[in-house]
Image (cartoon, rainbow, N blue to C red):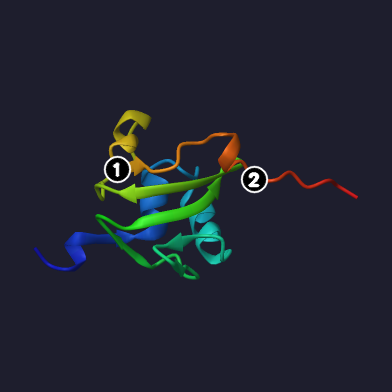
Amino acid sequence: MTAEAEAIRLDKWLWQARFVKTRSLAAQLCTSGRLRVGREIVSKPHRLVRIGDILTFPAGGQVRTVRVVALGSRRGPAEEARRLYEDLAPPSPATALPRTRAV
């Protein structure tokens, strides 16, 4: 296997794993500076992820921490998407993001 076959673009993986609804939203998350791969802050959506990488990012009002366990080849149903990652910090009150008040 080549190195390219063992990795996938981060924005594409986030979309396939159903953390975001569209690839453009995945790209926005990548460029926001709020997503980390390991300890590295990501700034580009074309950053490659590999099996074993740990991602930390905000999603659905929670801080999500997941390990990439598969790369996927398509955006399938939710059941298939859940096989792409291992949830290291399932959503809970402890991982909830603080709410900000509108002024």
At a point 19% along the width and 60% down the height, the residue shown is 6
Between residue 9 and residue 36, name the one nearer to us.
36
The residue located at (39%, 67%) in the rendering is 46
Q: Position of residue 100 (x, y in %)?
A: 78, 47
* Between discs 1 and 2, the one toward the N terminus: 1
Query: In the rendered image, which quarter contains the N terminus?
Result: bottom left
Amino acid at circle 2: Leu
Which mark, residue 84? 1
* Quadrant in which residue 59 is drawn: top right
Q: Residue at x 44, y 48 (%)?
A: 65
Q: CA distance from mark 1 to mark 2?
A: 24 Å
Mark 1 Cα shell of 10 Å, populated few (<14), some (14-19), many (≥20): many
Q: Nearer the viewer, mark 1 or mark 2?
A: 2
Residue 28 appears at what percent x and percent y?
55, 59
Q: Which quadrant of the structure image shows residue 96?
A: top right
Q: For mark 2, what is the residue?
A: 97
Q: Amino acid at mark 1?
A: Leu
Look at the numbered disc 2 and give the secondary structure of its residue.
loop
Identify the residue shown where x is 37% and y is 31%: 78
